[in-house]
Each structure stands twice: as C-alpha cells, then as structure tokens.
Image (cartoon, rainbow, N blue to C red):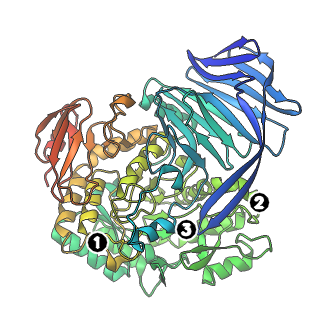
Amino acid sequence: MNLIIKENALELSFNGKTIITHSKENPFITAVVANYDVSTSHGNFKVKEKIKKRIPLTNYEIEKKLDDELSIVFYFQKVAIRVKTVKETDSAIRLYFETESKNYAWEFHTVGYPNEAIFGGGEQYRQLNLRNERVQNCVSEHIVVWPIIQKTLLDFKPYKEKGHFYIDTYAPMSTFVSSEMYAIRFETSKYGYQEFKDKTRNIFRYQECPKSMVYIMGKDFKDLGRKLAKDIPNNESIPDWVYDGLILGVQGGIDRAEEMAEKLIDAGAKVSAIWCQDWSGKKITAAGKQVYWNWEVDSSLYPHLKDRIAHLKKRGIRFLGYINPYLVKDGPMYNFCKDKGWLILNKKWEVYHVKSTTFDAGMMDLTNPEMVEYLKETLIKKNMLDLGIDGYMADFGEYLPIDAVLHKGDPEVLHNEWPTIWARLNREAVDSHERGKEVFFFTRSAYNGAQQYTTMMWNGDQHTDFSKDYGMPCTIPASFNLGFSGMTLVHSDIGGFISFNKLVRDPEIFVRWMEMNTFSMAMRSHETIRPEANSQPYDDAILQYTVSLTNVHVALAPYLKKVAKEAHEGIPAMRPDFYEDNDFTKRKDPYSYLLGSDIYVCPVIERGDVARDVHLPTGKWKQFFTNKEYAGEGKYLIDSPLGYPVAFYREDSEFAELFAGIKL
C-alpha cells in the first residue's frame, strides 16, 4: 500500500488503485450528530434519521508509516478516530477503526468511479446495480401492507411498482462488489446506509463506529468471491437427497400430504420430500392458514408421525417441518418459557409481543443460555430431528425490537445480528445431531456472517404475481445481490406466498415460476397462505407440467452438485449475464441468469407472453430440449409456450452430453 502525502491532503492506494482520498474540502471521515426515530409494525422497521450536526475530521496526524502498516488519527477539536491500516494479503488490506468519541454516527467516503456498477448489500430486490441508490443497513420484514392493498382493493388506480429505496429487506449485508474488481466489507452492526449517488465517491454511514473495513482486490468476479469467502467462510451446503426431485409444500395433515405426493409420483413426477409447515398445528387467521407456533408435533393432524416418516423414507421421500424463534401467545410452550423467564421482555418487564398478521407471539430470548439450550436440545433435536425430520424452514429472525429487554446485550446492536444468531443456533443444533449431515434447513433472514451457518437461503415471501417489485421477477436481482455479498445458495417459493383478495396465483404464474426453479439449486413449492384459492403442483391443470419439469430438475443433479461445490468456495450459483465476461457493459438482461458457468436461463416474466427475447452471453450455446445451436452475444426471439423453459447450455461444457439428453 502506498500513502501519498500532499499539502493538507492524503491519498491511500493499494496495488495501483486509489482507495481513499482526504483533504479539508473532502475529508475521509465525518462524525455526525443525529437523532434516530424507529417505528415498527408487524416486523417492518422504519428509521428516520435527523442530522443535527456534521463534524468533518479535517485534520490528521500520522502515527506510524510502514510498508505493511499505517496508523493515522483523523480529528477535529476533541472528536477523533484512529485508523490502523494493515496489509493482510497481496490483495487485501483492512482498516481498523478506534474512537473514544461517543454518541456519534460515522460517515466514510471511499473513492468511486464514474462508470462503475455496485452490487451486493445483501438481498436487494428491485435491481442489481446499486449505482445512484441509497441502500439501508437495517434488517426488516420485506412485505408491507400498502402495496397489497393497492394491488387488490384500489381498482380505480393502476398499480405502480415501487422503487428500490421503498422496498425493505430481510437480509441486508454491508458487503459490496464493484465492477472495477474490488470489494468493500464493513464490520458493523447498527443501523446505517450506503449511498452510491456521487460519481467520484461512495458513502458509508453507520450509527456506530465500525470495527473495521476490508478492501479486497480481485482479477475477476470469481476471484473476488473466493477471497470474500476467506474473509467470512461460506458453509452453505445441500444434502444429495435435495436433488432427487420436488420438495412438495403441502399441509392439512400427514394423510393429505401423502395423498398429494402419491398423486404426483403416480403421474410420473419426481418428489424428494414433503414439506409440512403445519406439522405443529394450524392457526386460522384473517390472512389465511398459518402455522400454530408451538414447536411439537400436532398428533391430531400428524398421528404416529415418527413411524410415518420412517415409512416415507424407505420409499425415498423425506419429511420437512418448520420452526421460527417465536411462540404463539398462551400456547403450551409460550406459557412454559414465560414461567421460566426465557422470553424477551418490554420496558415494563412484561413479555414483549410481536404481531404476525392478527395474532400475538412471544419471542425466545436467544441471548439466554437456558432458552438456547431448550431451543436446540428439545425443540429442534428432540421434537424434530429425533422424529426423523430431515429438514425444515427456519423462518423469521428479523423482528427483534430495539426497545426490548434481553437477558444479555443491547437490542439496538443485536437487531441486525439476530438473523445470524438464529442461523447459528440452528446450525449448532443440526451439526450436533447424529444425522446432521443429512439435514437441510433454509432461512429467509440474514446479516453479516450468516453464510457461516445457514445451509441455504430462500428469497422470503413474494407476491403471487409477475410484478418486478414484489413478485416472481424480484427474486432474480435479490439472488444476484446475495451472491455478491457472500450468500451463494438461494432459492424461492415456487409460485410465491402472499395471496389476498384477488391477488392469487393461477396456473400461468405457477408454471412460469416452476420453469424458473427447475433451473435452480432447490425446487420447492409452497401452498401459500390461502391454499384453496391458489394453483398447486398437484392440480389437474398443472400436473403434466410438474411431471415434466421435476424430471428435468433431477436430470440436472450431476451439474448442480458441481455448482454447489463452487458456491461453497464463494462463487454464486446464480450469476448475472455479464459475470463470466467480468464486464458490466455486456449486461443485456437483468432478469436472465447463469446457473453456474454452463447454463443460461431466461424466465418468462410477463403475463401472456409465449415468446422470449434472449440476449446470449459470450460463447457458443445450444438450447435445452431442441439442441439448436446459437451464437453468443446475439439477440433471438425464442418461442416459450407454457411449460417450456427457455434455457441454454454451453456447447463445450463437460456436461454437454448430459444436457443434450434431457427431454421435456
């Protein structure tokens, strides 16, 4: 690294690339005095920041200047912050921040480039390139009520899709990758934002002083992914049985679940598992059929479940369940944990209740060792894994109120960290069980470090439609950004989840979504919150498509296993069209994706379309199911009748023979 000292100015560069510049006119660091007003409803957090004073740290003093280490104090009057810069590898340096100046937010400016694109920031749904956007660093419920009302009840006004900043995320992460082939990752926990609107600088502001910032350079996107995975290890993984077919989301009891699975199998579909989210019981609310949040088997819906699971497994069908870190108010486990003092409290020292749709729930205190022990040993291992359950949805994790009273720790700091804590506890429980390597759990919320613990992410609750803000298309940029941030294995609910009034999924949206997830790392359906109102994979009108597409997915298994190994190294399974070329100027279609290096998928994302414009990436390609040849970097109109995925494979792929033999 090289520090250039000019008159009242500094410039820090690394391997020929300038990282920060500092002058009195444009200081590297500014201390900010601000008030933060946080409001929350149904797990959605809104933060209003009111800046009262900005204190640019215009002065500096160099304490140490060596080839591999620097120490500089930036200050103004009594406000100061020490920045220690250490060269960690030939391609990475880390800036450590230390300050005794309290009650400030801290703003950092790094060098930006006029034509650079910025990716990452965790799960950002609306678009991939975050240039010209402000990205919040706040874990929050993704789904809010107002867009649903606009779509379903305000018939007099056409629905206008929401912009990027409006849309909250379950999984923000303070990791960003630039098209200039560098990555920045801040180690911080509290609220903040990152802004990429200035063409010459990128702004990172956090409510607390970050512990550090790492700057990593790479020769290409894959190289950056691998290096980010060395900084925070990626331990995502998929058991082999997941590739054996559809994970069929079905509820209503074990008899109905087996009946629906039998219908699919008898028709010729491939089913790897049945996923019964209501294994613990169902709760009917104004929103629809929801899970009864009491984490033990409901013997009326699922009698003799251990024996039934064993019988299913002998036939090659796994059984999956569901859990989240909450307990329905006045349920048996709620009352037990309340009496033990294991639930999160409010300022009145009463149980702090959160509301999901129309019912209240208490929150397990994941900072309480006794609660954690009960969660891992009883709720997960005894009540689920000992029954033979081979996987589950580890839902939620983003609802921790900042005014809560915890057994230990500051909820303002732990709010963002809560999803990672939740994922870690699940991973510890699973790994300590004798069948741990067979178990597949998937999470929807995340923050920095969650890739060390979850086995796979899913995109959360989408609307059952084609809208680009909350519907099927939004899962594509969301998965890209997660991949750039270090979460490399992602999938979505086939057909979406949110259904209200006239917002229902018909056969078209369900089949188009199933086409997309055929070419994904996990093929899993969800019945939605209103199963009877929405199309399902076992419906007579859809059954033929379920049969053909599940067989295609199973045929892809050898290739998917290779992609999963790359994901473990830090290379995303789903990649944007420019990823292999390492050239953002070659981006042509934000809603098509590479699955690994050798498959290119172009989902149909417009209602009524029976043809799809395709811009193929560099290379020679063949179309799945026809083996027709196409030249890369060309534009083609491809017929896409319902049930016919638009997908291509590289002519020179080591799996070309396998791909050529796959038929619908």
Labels 1 & 3 near each other (Cβ < 8 A): no
Quarter of the view holding residue 370: bottom right
| Label 2 residue SS | loop
Q: Residue 365's spot in the image, x, y percent?
A: 69, 66
User: Where residue 536 is drawn, which disc sits there?
Assistant: 1
- Please state which amino acid type lies under the numbered disc 1: Gln
- Please state which amino acid type lies under the numbered disc 3: Asn
User: Where residue 594 is drawn, which disc sits there?
Assistant: none
The residue at which mark 3 appears reads as 324
The residue shown at (79%, 70%) is: 347
Residue 439, placed above or below residue 267: above
Location of the C terminus (image quadrant) = bottom left
Residue 518, placed above or below residue 100: below
The residue shown at (58%, 56%) is: 428
| Label 1 residue SS | loop
Quarter of the view holding residue 106: top right
Q: Which residue appears farthest toward the right when viewing the image? A: 78
Q: Which residue appears farthest toward the front when viewing the image? A: 156
**In the image, 222: left or right of 41?**
left
